[in-house]
Amino acid sequence: MKNIKKVVLNAKLVKLRRKYFFNKNKVDRLENLDKRQSLSKLDEENNIEVISSKFGEDDSIEVISSKSYVHRAYILQALAGGSLDAIKVNEFSNDMILTKQAIEKIKCAKESFDVATPLILDCKDSGSTLRFILPILGVLGIEATILIEESLSKRPMKIFEEELKRNGMSIYKELFSKREELKKIENYKEKEHKKGEVSTNIYKLNVKGKLEAGTFILKGNVSSQYISGLLMALPMLKEDSKIILTSKLESKGYVDLTIEMLSKFGIEIIEQIGNKGFFEYTILGNQKSQKVNNFFIEGDWSNGSFMLVAILLAKQKNKVLNDFFISGLNLTSLQKDREIIEVLEKFKICIDYKYENDKVLLSPFLNKEEIVKDKIRIKNIRNSNIIRKIDGSQIPDIIPVIALLGAVFDGVTHIYNINRLRYKESDRIKAIEYVLKSFDIEVEVFEDALIIKGKDILELNQDLIGLSAKTQEIGYKKIAENEDRLILSGFNDHRIIMMEAILSVAFNKKIVIKGWEAINKSYPNFFNQLSRLNIDTFILE
């Protein structure tokens, strides 16, 4: 690319004028489609193997719209009585679809004043959808049966349900025993299981009652989604309410994002520090969200973080000879995972950027120079004594990509304050351990921390040679290696699957990902976009 300005992006970049870079349409992604067509084939075992694609120079990958923004935009637009078509999304993930379907049913019941007829809502494994719609059902007094998959039923909900019950709601969980009745439910599609797989249990939450205004007392270190759900629901009540936190708020960026979205829809939230030093939120009653027109959603920094690292690896492994850029990411976004830029700096990774058609395009590169008072000093970045310390309390969704970086760079990476990862789609700490050990990476695991001793893969431009040939038991599932491929469990976790696919590039190791379909939860086009980088080291089974 021409006329590219190289900079190290850091906190100073926030001083750029406050401007959001939204995905304006799909035209960019459709240009030169013939050059970007990804090819696929079936191997002898009928696994889907993604192979190299063709692309032209000056190419870019558009990151999927932010799931966090989409959830909130759909809910607030529906509560305002507006059309959800006004929320402009460049690509739909499963979680987005679940929220859209649920809030559309709630909107219809609200507008028809038919709150007595019980709704049947399907949340599958979407924690955001479930935790956001529960208090909304209570505020509107809508009775509903909410279907959830077993993995979601095991995630923390107790303290949230207790507060909702204390303020007027009735919530009762039970096993959905009559599976044949699922087929009668409108729009319900049960997860397909391959031959030999065991179907997971389906549970239902029976929700009744009217949520009353009052004081809601919650821990701040369990799930910020409890707080966001209440913030979107409580303004509809006639009286004022208050949320009081009893511990430090983790993932505060998501609450800030919720407050920002509420403001865009005309709703005011008052945030302050309470007597005990923790956040409190005052929600004024009788507020009604105002519908919007043509609201364009910015790109997802969580998923964009993985793609930035994938591009870096593709460059270092000579998979691509030209610069590849990412579009759709907002440099001044309130998405906390934007901090990946600061994390990349710890690994001496910098970002090229340029503006094009009112968008910012980003591309990573390894920095072997250090700028000191306008002078360039060559710096040797190979140092096995490097210790990087990263607090993961506010950025849980990008811990897998940080662990990936720790694996392929020299030195020790200490990631701490990550206990909540044990309650994601998988026990994500244990899953990360599994993945790293599968690639013979040394990792020490604690209850809320990981210490990773990396291999000098990128800086020496070497491939991993001599992976352990033995079959080993790590955590959940046995993995085995043969001459051609390493077989890995995807843990039904979209972020672990992305981590595995990208690690295979660094180590130039063919892998088979079991249960790869879980990627559809947040990034359905992920593997197609990897194929455009000539990445062909994974097989989807």
Image: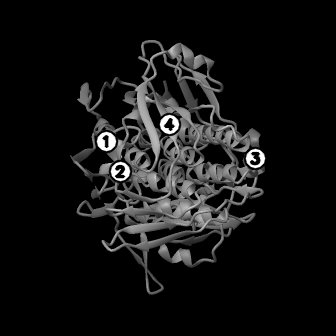
* Foreground pick, 411 / 187: 187
- Check disc 1 and give the amino acid type: Leu
Side (left or right) of 442 relative to 484? left
Q: Secondary structure at mark 3?
A: helix
Query: Between residues 53 and 529, which one lies in front from this camera angle?
Result: 529
Marks 2 and 4, Cα distance to the nearest angstrom? Answer: 39 Å
Q: Quadrant of the N terminus?
A: bottom right
Q: Position of residue 448 (x, y in %)?
A: 26, 51
User: Closer to the N terminus: mark 1 or mark 3?
Assistant: 3
Mark sitting on residue 436: 1
Disc 2 target residue: 403
Residue lying at 41% horizontally and 44% vertically, measured from the top left: 161
- 240 relative position to 292: left or right: left
The first of marks 3 and 2 along the sequence is 3
Q: Earlier in the sequence, mark 1 or mark 4?
A: 4
Q: Which residue is mark 4?
A: 207
Disc nearer the start of the sequence (2/4): 4
**Residue type at the position of mark 4:** Val
Residue beneath the point at 37% across and 46% down: 162
Q: Secondary structure at mark 4?
A: strand
Residue 127 picture location, percent across and down: 47, 42
Cα–Cα span, label 3 and label 2: 38 Å
* Image quadrant in which you'd find residue 279: bottom left
Question: Can residue 16 be seen in this snapshot?
Answer: yes
Above or below 541: residue 449: below
| Whether label 1 touches label 3, CB < 8 Å | no
Q: Secondary structure at mark 1?
A: helix
